Image (spheres, grey):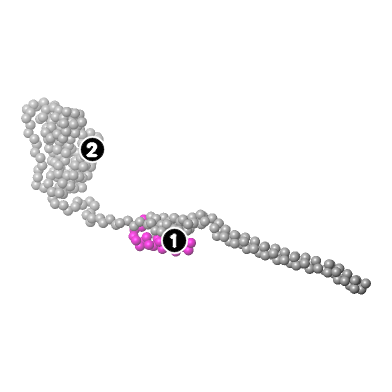
Amino acid sequence: MGPGFGAGRRRMGSGRHGPPRRSRLSELLFERRTLLLVIVLIGFFVVVAIGSGGTDNPVEEQQDLAAQLQSAMVRAGLSTVTVDVDDWKVALSGRVASDELREAATRVAQAHPDVVSVVSRIVVPTPIVEEATPEDEDPDLPANQADLLLQARLSAAAAHTPIQFGSGGDRITEGSIPTLEMIAEFLVANPSVRVQIIGHTDSDGEEDANLTLSRIRAEAVRAQLIARGVEAERLTPLGMGESDPVADNLTREGKARNRRIEFLVLPEGQEGLSAPTTTSTSEAPAADG
């Protein structure tokens, strides 16, 4: 019974203590795997948190960078430079006065640590070399060219709005006042200029009467310029009547163009045009409209 009993005890012992050892080992392995899994998961979430924290809102961050750089440009005296940021790359545009200022704008942008690169599209205008002629002074031209220049300016002022008169008389219309003012200002600004004021009519009426009317109208313009500060001795009136038309006298428009006042610059030593002679002997006062 002894051996059998002993053998029986060993079998019973091995059956009671063997399985608990294997269960404990399994528990330890399970705990280690669980701990390792928890560590891996924690590391993963940490990495995700760090990554997401760095790119929380890149659009707003780049807008903030653009605002910072724009403020830096203003502080550097480069307020005409515009800053744009795209993918952390900076583009500069605008206009500055010199290449040195353009380079300074680039350096201001490059100084920020978040800037990847800088592209400068800043324009430096080509300097314009102006002539030394004073603004209110005529260029130094030969005498005949200077006279032509003055004549062109005077003619341009006279053509602004043609000087007109009431029908058959010498009353200057109200609409002609601005032109008279412009001519007076020109003559006051050029005190050495002498001018012949030439009146013209259309062909309606008698030739002699038109000649007389044209001179009366020239004298009326002269009186208006004298009243505006132009010296009388600088103004010579002349009537040309219907002798020098610039358009036909068959249409209303043509006649209106022929009824005009012209201004002729008189070079030194010249007296201007002479009055025409007429062939009409009628003393009728009829004249153009």
Q: Nearer the viewer, mark 2 or mark 1?
A: 1
Please name the amino acid that badge 1 sits on.
Ser
Mark 2, residue position: 161
Q: Quadrant of the N terminus?
A: bottom right
Mark 2: give few (<14), some (14-19) or many (20+) Cα within 10 Å. some
Q: Residue at x 30, y 56 (%)?
A: 126
Front-lying residue, 269 or 228: 269
Q: Residue at x 7, y 28 (%)?
A: 280
User: Residue 112: image x %, image y %?
Assistant: 46, 62
- Residue lying farthest right? 1
Q: Residue at x 12, y 37 (%)?
A: 238
Q: Quadrant of residue 10?
A: bottom right
- Residue 77, disc: none
Type of amino acid under label 2: Thr
Residue at disc 2, secondary structure: loop
Which quadrant would the C terminus be assigned to in this image?
Answer: top left
In the image shown, does 58 or 100 lie closer to the viewer?
58
Range shown magenta: 95-116
Q: Of 244 and 199, which appears nearest the observer?
A: 244
- Vertical position of residue 230 compared to residue 207: above or below: below
Q: Where residue 17 sits in the image (x, y, percent)?
A: 82, 68
